[in-house]
Image (cartoon, rainbow, N blue to C red):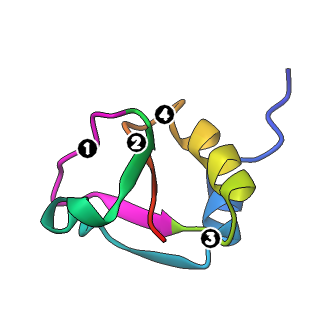
Amino acid sequence: MKQLLNYKDCEDLSNTICKSFYHGRSDEFEVWRNKKVPNNKNSIMYFYDNLQTALMSYNVFKSKHKCSLVWRE
């Protein structure tokens, strides 16, 4: 089955990309996929405008990288 999105597509769909600050403020987030959030000083957070886009991107990223899907209101 052909993959609909690639890594670059997922980057382009995000509205913000920044160095991860999850572990300094984890109480602000709810983990939806992969409860073991990567704890790495080189981790990156991608922010999406809606859950559908975030979930599609998570499914692309998880095939090659340790990642989690978290939500913050």
* Left or right: 5, with 22 as reference point: right
Image mark for residue 69: none
Say whether marks 2 and 1 touch (CB < 8 Å): yes
* For marks 3 and 4 on the same chain, the one whose residue lies earlier in the sequence: 3
Residue furthest top in the image: 1
Name the chief secondary structure element in magenta. loop
Q: Nearer the viewer, residue 23 or 41?
A: 23
Q: Which residue is mark 4?
A: 64
- Magenta residues span 35-46
- Image location of residue 26, percent across then percent down: 23, 59
Mark 2 vs mark 1, CA separation in Å: 6 Å
Image mark for residue 67: 2
Q: Which residue is mark 3?
A: 14
Amino acid identity at mark 2? Cys
- Image location of residue 25, percent across then percent down: 20, 68
- Image location of residue 29, percent across then percent down: 35, 59
